[in-house]
Amino acid sequence: MIHTFAPADAGMVAEFEALSVDRETRGTLESFLCDGPLAVKRNGDVATHDRRIAECDAPLKGYDAILLAQFSVTSAAELLRGRTDITVLTSPESAIDEMRRRSETDRVLGTAC
C-alpha cells in the first residue's frame, strides 16, 4: 500500500486487517509512505506529484498488487501502471467494484431497492 499521509497509515492498516478477518482471507499488507508528493500536489503540480508517486514503486517488486490508498493518490494510477506489471488498485476503483458486487448480489437475491 502506498500512501502519502503518515497519520493515515494506522487506520488504513487496521481497516485492511479487519476486512481480512471479516472475509476470512489470508492477505497481508505492507505499507509504504511516499513522502513529499502531497505538498507538491497542494501547490498545484499534479504531474510532479504523479511522477513521484510512480517512482515510489521501486521497493515493491515481487508483490501481488499495489494499492494506492488515498483518493488524492489516484491520479498517479495510470503512470504507475505503465511502470510495472504488478496490478495497481486504487481506493475509488475498489469502492466502485465493491458497490457493483453488492448491487449484483442484491439483484440476484432480490433484495435491491
Image (cartoon, rainbow, N blue to C red):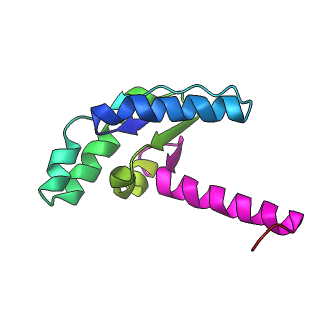
| Residue 69 lies in the magenta stretch | no
Q: Is residue 87 magenta?
A: yes
Left or right: residue 23 compared with residue 16:
right
Name the residue located 43 percent from the left edge and 33 percent from the top edge: 11
Name which quarter of the figure residue 63 lies in: top right
Q: Position of residue 102 (x, y in %)?
A: 72, 59
Q: Quadrant of the N terminus?
A: top left
Instruction: Please determine whether, in this image, residue 97 is positioned above or below residue 55.
Output: below
Left or right: 17 in relation to 47: right
Q: Quadrant of residue 96?
A: bottom right
**62 left or right of 97?**
left
Residue under the point 87% across and 65% down: 108
Q: Which residues are magenta?
A: 82-110
Q: Nearer the viewer, residue 16 or 85?
A: 16
Q: Position of residue 113 (x, y in %)?
A: 75, 74
Q: Residue at the location (55% across, 38% down)? A: 65
Residue 69 position within the rendered picture, expressed as x and y whole percent measured from the top left: 43, 43
Front-most of residues 23 and 39:
23
Q: Say if residue 84 shows up in the picture.
A: yes
Q: How many marks?
A: 0
Q: Magenta stretch: dominant SS? A: helix
